[in-house]
Structures are given as C-alpha cells and as structure tokens.
Amino acid sequence: MKDLSAIRGILFDLDGVLYVGPSIIEGAIDALAEIKQKGYSRRFITNTSTLSSASLHKKLLNLGFDIDEHEIISATRAALIYLQQFVDPSCHLLLSDDVKQDFRQFRQSSKKADFVIVGDIGDAWSYKLLNTVFKELINGAQLIAIHKNRFWQTEDGLQMDIGGFVGALEYASQKQATIIGKPSREFFQSALTDLELSPQQVAIIGDDIDTDIGGGQDAGLTGILVKTGKYRQDYADSSPIIPDLTLPSITELPACLPTLS
C-alpha cells in the first residue's frame, strides 16, 4: 500500500466520492468525521457546474455533511475569479440559471461577447446554439470551459458531460478553450495555496481517473482512486494513469491515514 505518512491535507472530490445525485455514498459522513478527527486539513474541490456556490453548500448540509462553505473550491467560483482580472468583460453565459446568479456582476451578451463561458446546461444544447457560439468564437470571443469532463454518473447511469461540446467548439473554431477546473494545474494549485501545503503533503481522492487522479498527479499530489461514482474497471484498466492507491470507497480511507500529532 502507498505510504501516506507525508500527507497532511486531503482534497475531496464531491460527486461520486461523497454522493451520487441525492444519495450519500455509504459511510462517507463517518469517514470525513474520522479523517478530520485525525488532524488532516481538507478542501472539497469540484467541477460541478449546475449549482451556485450557495446552493452547493446547502446541498451538502442537507445531505448531512459538516462542511464549511470556505472549504469548498468549485470550478465555477474559479471561473468567476478568472474573469475578474479583465476590465468590464461581456460574457455569453452557457450556464444553469442557478450558477448565472454568481456571474451577475458581468455584462451579458449572446452575440458579441468577449468570453463564452461553458458549463452544464443539460438538454439546452442544440446545433443552433453550437453554431451561434461557433460564430462568436471565429469573430474574436474567447472560449472558457468550467471543465472538460467526458461523462458523469447520475442515478440513471452515465451521462455525457460538457467535454464533448467544448471539444466540438474547439475543433470547429480552431481555438483552444481555457479549462478552469480539474485537471487544470492552476486549479489544484489554488487548493494547495488555500491549504498552505506543498504538493507532496496533499492527496486527492476522486472517482475520475482523468481529472481527479491524472490532474492531481500532474500537479504533484498523491492520487487516490475510489471505485464509486463514475468509476468503471475497464476504463481505469485502459488508462495510462496509474493511481497511487485504489480503494473500494471513501470508507476505507481513514484506516490508511495515521493520526497526526
């Protein structure tokens, strides 16, 4: 088993590690409490782009998790911070109505935007919308993707995520999207900065071998893969990414971690 004695902080993915949809992963609440009791710093990092920061925190509380809002580092919040470096940018927001509330400070335009921000809009995708965005991009707009995940786990099974739409827009416009969330190294670095720990002192636990484990390892973190959520054995076996540790679920993590003095 991977030696975790150098670890002082844990980054937890949310969807697929702590819960799937409205259902808690069995044992997740007790596991988090035990890890906290052992003295580990923690942050919760997520590419979820369907809920605003406030709504996401409320969901976690309603599920029974004892998590402070400042402990959550979301890709949508990172996108907000990214846009704030520009002077009065106009934005075409392909975001859920709830998440749009976090972006109220920016001018919105669906024709001559400086930035097109792509998140999860569910069934609102269409050829007409893709073509509208394509025209914006070739006319100078920059493409910002909250993330570029391939798929995600729902109560009804795997569902295509926004990565396919982002990829289509990149291919057609010949423009590279700026990826805000995982597996962006900058996103992981923001979490390390918040924890005030080095990469060698932090582990990421997630169900996505590409964004969680691959992204975390690329940033120098220890990658712990769980076999819950979107995890699929055949997909993991065919990946060039090798987790530092693989566990059945988050429930097994506390036993792998020594108590910190």
Image: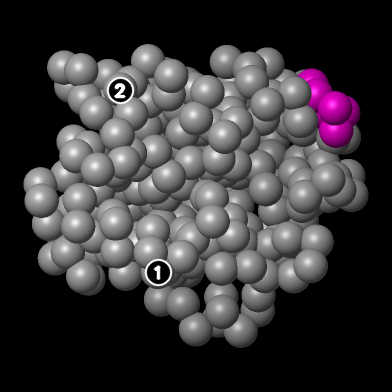
Which residue is at 17% across, 64% downward? 173
Query: In percent of the image, x 20 and y 17: which residue is there?
Result: 88
Please say whether residue 120 is one of the residues in the magenta stretch.
no
State the residue at coordinates (77%, 52%): 20
Secondary structure found at label 1: helix
Q: Is residue 40 visible?
A: no
The magenta region covers 61-66
Residue that carries the numbered disc 2 in the rendered image:
107
Residue 189 x %, y %? 34, 33
The answer to which of 139 and 95 lies nearer the viewer is 139
Query: Horizontal and vertical percent for residue 79?
Result: 37, 32
Q: Residues within 10 Å of mark 2 (few under 14, many from 20)?
A: some
Instruction: Say how the picture is coloured.
Output: one colour
Amino acid type at image mark 1? Tyr
Considering only vertical position in the picture, is 116 above or below 226? Answer: above
- CA gap between label 2 and label 1 equals 25 Å
State the mark number for residue 127.
Answer: 1
Q: Say few, some or many: other residues with alpha carbon within 10 Å of mark 1 (under 14 / 14 to 19 / 20 or more).
A: few
**The N terminus: image quadrant:** bottom right
Going from N to C along the chain, the mark reached first, 2 or 1, is 2
Q: Identify the image quadrant of residue 53.
A: top right
Q: Position of residue 82 (x, y in %)?
A: 29, 27
Q: Are marks 2 and 1 in contact (CB under 8 Å)?
A: no
**Picture layout, residue 52 above or below residue 93:** above
Q: Nearer the viewer, residue 200 or 45?
A: 45
Residue 152 appears in the picture as rendered: yes
The image quarter in which residue 45 lies? top right
Query: Residue 86: where, in percent of width, then height?
Result: 18, 21
Q: Amino acid at mark 2?
A: Arg
Give the side of residue 186 with respect to residue 252, left or right.
left
